[in-house]
Amino acid sequence: MAKKKKEIRDMSKDQLIDHIEILKKELFNLKIEIMSGQNNNTSNISKIKKDIARAKTFINIQSKEVESSNA
């Protein structure tokens, strides 16, 4: 589930996009489990959201690095 910052930093842009999609599916399934009463651990929702935001941040950082190297 949660990857360390170094692991995320080492991923390529395509890998990060795939990782975000997996996390979004995991978040959806977790919300369904919580609504149906199968899971009571709501703290996982915020952890997954933070992982998604972290991955999106590294995508933006990589994009800015590419733009600055082209300029």
Image (spheres, rainbow, N blue to C red):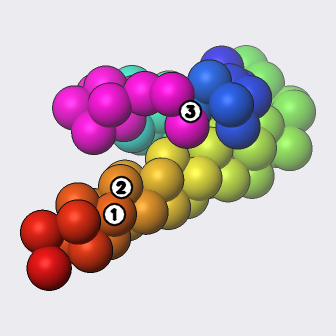
Horizontally, residue 64 falls left or right of residue 10, namely left
Mark 2, residue position: 62
Q: Nearer the viewer, residue 24 or 40?
A: 24
Q: Nearer the viewer, residue 40 or 44?
A: 44
State how far apart marks 2 and 3 are (Cα). Answer: 12 Å
Residue name at image x 43 percent, y 27 percent: 11
Image depth: mark 1 or mark 3 in front = 1
Majority secondary structure of magenta residues:
helix
Q: Quadrant of residue 6?
A: top right
Q: Nearer the viewer, residue 54 or 70?
A: 70
User: x, y (%) of residue 5?
Assistant: 70, 37
User: x, y (%) of residue 2?
Assistant: 71, 27
Q: Secondary structure at mark 3?
A: helix
Across the whole image, how many numbered discs are drawn on residues? 3
* Dot label at residue 65: 1
User: x, y (%) of residue 24?
Assistant: 42, 39
Q: Is 2 rendered above or below residue 5?
A: above
Q: Amino acid at mark 2?
A: Gln
State how far apart marks 1 and 2 are (Cα). Answer: 5 Å
Q: Amino acid at mark 1?
A: Glu
Residue name at image x 22 percent, y 32 percent: 14
Query: Label 1 crowding class (10 Å Cα cut-off): few <14, some 14-19, many 20+?
Result: few
Question: Which range of residues does the magenta coloring cover?
Answer: 9-19
Upstream in sequence: badge 1 or badge 3: 3
Mark 3, residue position: 8
Q: Amino acid at mark 3?
A: Ile
